[in-house]
Image (spheres, coloured by chain):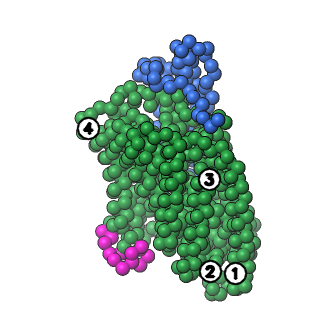
Chain colours: A blue, B green
């Protein structure tokens, strides 16, 4: 049947404020933010630096490097490279540093949930 | 015709028309069969809006690329580079870098906390009614602007391919395209739409790859030679340098910055992109989808650089500008130059398919937002059953489809990439501040959300209305009038910071505090995936 697989409504009995205060969650939160915030600031600064150069430093951007390839084109292509690089880095980081803790916390909560109902702990986490 | 494209004679064009229609008809037939097969399992709301959350990350990533690489990317960017040279390249870069915002800050957290729509996430820990209404309205506004751009693209393409310049003929073709789109969405829901987008993404990227290799082979796989040829044809070495379009005055430079800002901050706030993250089973698959789409989209934008300069070198900016369809005709004309009627036929059919697929994605997003947010949660106060909700969504599809057809008949002439950039500006102003604040700022309140969303939405739309896009110049939508008191054609540089400011201000002056337990729940769920919506099991 096209029915959504029911997960126990964790909200009903889990004290999320308590979970939020646990050291494990604080560690996950810190790891997440200490990666995504500096990275977001860095790529935005780099992007806006590029846009500003294209708008106000036309002479510099038009400097020819090899044949008809100029600084503007190289910097533009480097934006592609940095985007691909940050993507790969983030995937690597979250696979190693974020996913295991997140899975632990999730299993802890959802397992706890099942125990309370008197049922065996099922592998609900996908 | 003869003076526009020297190689085209009337007979050849007639051949091409039949061929175009043939290839397009084949695409419609194949996708229709797939949509029918895919839709047999459409039973619940999760099936209809979120394809049962059953797509894999790579499938969804391809569909996102299909959704994102709209007529704006293919026709618009290629045309912008062909005519304005380097300045057109900014679109590619902004459209791509923007995905990092989605990857790092939005995709996974959103997948973990929402159900079907953007409003699900924004109203999670704030007061339901006001936030949902605001989020739904801005969703509808963004979808409307985006639809307008796609339909304008359809108009350009039709006038080029069929040589139909009379109003009635073009309108008829737009009606046919619109009717097909309504059919796809009504029958297929999100699952059908997703398959159409996947097929289209593969065709588009393969077609662009073939053309790119073809162009490069003409210049001995030497990019420098290609650029030199483009500068020679243009008789202007400045096509390789920034500033050809935006470097003229201080105002136009500011406009360039404004465009750059809207592009990079808009993507992660586009409702139809956000909704795609609900079609996968977990946050991890949502991450995989974004990674896939970044690779595919980045690759495609590298192609557009070659295609744009290729069109500038081989077809020439003057020929492109004077062709029916104007700037948007660069890619089809290049295809004709390279591979004659057959390649033109294939590329045009792909471009048609592109418009069809993107319009379908936008329509289902707008319909879901109306049915799920406004009808089910606000009008019926959450008591509507899922069957009625889906019925309302289907009816909304028809209404939006008709609006899109009308919009398409009346919108024409403007560069499609440019019109889409306006949709990005509206999305970045109305949605992004509230998305970021509600995911990351503990103290954020309902008043902050509504001030930011309504303020950002109103500022963006009013500034567009008062800009040279709408009145004051020969290329404006209303060329006869002049009420363009705002000098920039993209409002982003004013409206986006304003919306962030309003979100902050609305929160700090708010005397009400939001529920701390809800905040804790949202934060824990967003990072861990506890209690996230699971895939539908059939």
Name the residue nearer the viewer: B37 or B343: B37
**Element at label 2:** loop
Which residue position holds label 4? B510
Mark 2 crowdedness (10 Å alpha carbons): few <14, some 14-19, many ≥20: some
* Left-right relation of B134 to B188: left
Q: Is residue B462 above or below residue B106?
A: below
Q: CA distance from mark 4 to mark 2?
A: 59 Å
Q: Is residue A50 above or below residue B80?
A: above
Q: CA distance from mark 3 to mark 1?
A: 35 Å
Question: Could you tell me which chain the residue with mark 3 belongs to?
Answer: B
Question: Could you tell me which chain the residue with mark 2 belongs to?
Answer: B
Which of the 4 image quarters holds residue B380? top left
Residue found 36% across the figure and 73% down from its top: B471
Which residue position holds label 1? B13
Same-chain check, marks 1 and 4: yes
- The nearer-to-camera label among 3 and 1 is 3
Q: CA distance from mark 1 to mark 4?
A: 64 Å
Which residue position holds label 3? B187
> Mark 2 vs mark 3: which is more N-terminal?
2
> Mark 4 vs mark 2: which is more N-terminal?
2
Q: Check contact, mark 3 vs mark 1: CB within 8 A.
A: no
Q: From which residue to which does the magenta span run?
A: B472-485
Name the residue nearer the viewer: B199 or B89: B199
- The nearer-to-camera label among 3 and 4 is 3
Q: Is residue A92 above or below residue B374?
A: above
């Amino acid at each position: 049947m096209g029915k959504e697989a029911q997960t126990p409504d964790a909200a009903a009995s889990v004290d999320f404020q308590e979970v939020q205060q646990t050291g494990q969650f604080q560690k996950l939160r810190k790891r997440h933010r200490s990666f995504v915030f500096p990275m977001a600031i860095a790529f935005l600064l780099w992007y806006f630096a590029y846009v500003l150069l294209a708008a106000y430093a036309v002479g510099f951007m038009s400097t020819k490097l090899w044949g008809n390839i100029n600084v503007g084109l190289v910097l533009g292509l480097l934006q592609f490279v940095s985007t691909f690089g940050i993507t790969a880095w983030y995937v690597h980081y979250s696979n190693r540093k974020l996913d295991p803790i997140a899975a632990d916390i999730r299993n802890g909560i959802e397992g706890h949930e099942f125990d309370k109902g008197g049922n065996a702990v099922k592998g609900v986490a996908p | 015709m003869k003076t526009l494209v020297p190689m085209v004679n009337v007979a050849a064009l007639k051949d091409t028309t039949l061929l175009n229609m043939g290839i397009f008809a084949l695409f419609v037939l194949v996708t229709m069969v797939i949509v029918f097969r895919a839709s047999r399992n459409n039973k619940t709301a999760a099936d209809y809006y979120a394809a049962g959350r059953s797509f894999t990350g790579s499938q969804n990533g391809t569909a996102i690329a299909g959704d994102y690489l709209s007529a704006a990317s293919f026709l618009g960017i290629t045309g912008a580079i062909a005519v304005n040279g380097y300045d057109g390249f900014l679109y590619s870069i902004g459209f791509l870098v923007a995905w990092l915002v989605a990857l790092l800050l939005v995709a996974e957290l959103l997948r973990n906390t929402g159900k079907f729509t953007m409003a699900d996430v924004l109203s999670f820990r704030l007061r339901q009614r006001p936030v949902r209404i605001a989020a739904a309205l801005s969703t509808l506004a963004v979808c409307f602007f985006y639809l307008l751009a796609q339909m304008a693209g359809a108009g350009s393409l039709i006038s080029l391919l069929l040589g139909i310049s009379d109003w009635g003929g073009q309108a008829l073709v737009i009606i046919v395209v619109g009717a097909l789109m309504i059919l796809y969405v009504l029958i297929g829901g999100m699952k059908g739409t997703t398959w159409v987008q996947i097929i289209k993404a593969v065709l588009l990227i393969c077609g662009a790859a073939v053309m790119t290799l073809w162009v490069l082979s003409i210049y001995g796989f030497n990019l420098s030679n290609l650029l030199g040829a483009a500068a020679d044809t243009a008789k202007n070495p400045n096509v390789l340098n920034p500033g050809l379009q935006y470097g003229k005055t201080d105002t136009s430079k500011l406009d360039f910055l404004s465009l750059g800002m809207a592009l990079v901050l808009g993507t992660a706030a586009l409702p139809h992109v956000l909704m795609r993250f609900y079609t996968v089973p977990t946050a991890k698959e949502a991450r995989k989808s974004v990674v896939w789409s970044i690779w595919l989209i980045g690759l495609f934008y590298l192609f557009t650089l070659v295609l744009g300069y290729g069109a500038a070198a081989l077809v020439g900016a003057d020929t492109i500008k004077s062709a029916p369809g104007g700037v948007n005709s660069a890619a089809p004309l290049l295809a004709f130059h390279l591979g004659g009627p057959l390649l033109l036929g294939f590329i045009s059919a792909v471009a048609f398919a592109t418009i069809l697929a993107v319009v379908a994605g936008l329509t289902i997003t707008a319909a879901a937002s109306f049915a799920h947010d406004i009808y089910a949660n606000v009008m019926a106060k959450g008591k509507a059953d899922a069957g009625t909700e889906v019925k309302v969504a289907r009816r909304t599809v028809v209404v939006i489809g008709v609006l899109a057809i009308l919009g398409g008949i009346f919108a024409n002439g403007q560069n499609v990439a440019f019109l889409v950039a306006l949709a990005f500006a509206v999305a970045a102003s109305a949605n992004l501040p509230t998305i970021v604040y509600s995911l990351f700022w503990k103290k954020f309140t309902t008043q902050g959300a509504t001030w930011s969303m309504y303020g950002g939405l109103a500022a963006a739309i009013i500034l567009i209305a008062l800009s040279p896009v709408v009145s004051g110049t020969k290329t404006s939508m209303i060329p006869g009038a002049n009420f363009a008191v705002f000098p920039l054609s993209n409002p982003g540089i004013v409206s986006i910071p304003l919306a962030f400011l309003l979100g902050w201000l609305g929160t700090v002056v708010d005397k009400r505090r939001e529920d701390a337990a809800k905040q804790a729940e949202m934060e824990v769920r967003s990072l861990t995936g506890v209690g996230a919506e699971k895939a539908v099991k059939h």
